[in-house]
Amino acid sequence: MPKTPMRSSKSTSRRTMPRRGAKSGTMESQTKEELYRKAKKAGIEGRSQMSKSELISALRQR
């Protein structure tokens, strides 16, 4: 019978873990998807074509 690889005992995914060194709640520590949702809620047009840094800039200008 072939052995199955062992899974990590950690149940938290990397996306939900705060990045080390980043202040929690800062836009830089959020994912592009999170920023996109905020931009959508803020009514920012052209958000689907924006990079993460462009989303941050657009959100800060609002």
Image (tube, rainbow, N blue to C red):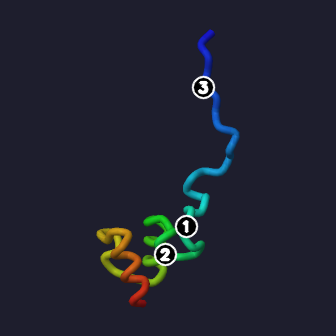
* Residue 9 place in picture, x, y as percent: 70, 39
Task: Bin the neighbour count of mark 1 within 10 Å (Cα to Cα): few under 14, some 14-19, many 20 and up.
Answer: few
The circle on residue 5 is 3
Q: What element carries label 1?
A: loop
Give the residue at mark 2.
27
Instruction: Find the distance from the CA under tag 1 to the CA under tag 3.
Output: 32 Å
Decide: is 20 above or below 4. Answer: below
Q: Which of 48 and 56 is in front in this view?
A: 56
Task: Bin the neighbour count of mark 2 within 10 Å (Cα to Cα): few under 14, some 14-19, many 20 and up.
Answer: some
Residue furthest out toward the top: 1
Q: Which of 21 and 31 is in front in this view?
A: 21
Q: Which of 8 and 1 is in front in this view?
A: 8
Q: What residue type is labelled 2?
A: Met
Residue at point 57% right, 73% down?
A: 23
Give the residue at mark 1.
21
* Residue 3 place in picture, x, y as percent: 62, 17
Instruction: Find the distance from the CA under tag 2 to the CA under tag 3.
Output: 37 Å
Residue furthest out toward the bottom: 62
* Badge 1 or badge 3: first in the primary sequence: 3
For discs 1 and 3, the disc positioned in front in the rendered view: 1
* Residue 38 place in picture, x, y as percent: 48, 76
Left or right: 30, with 46 as reference point: right
Instruction: Find the distance from the CA under tag 1 to the CA under tag 2.
Output: 13 Å
Q: What residue type is labelled 1?
A: Gly
Quadrant of the snapshot with the C terminus: bottom left
Q: Which amino acid does label 3 sit on?
A: Pro
* Residue 27 place in picture, x, y as percent: 49, 75
Labels 2 & 3 near each other (Cβ < 8 A):
no
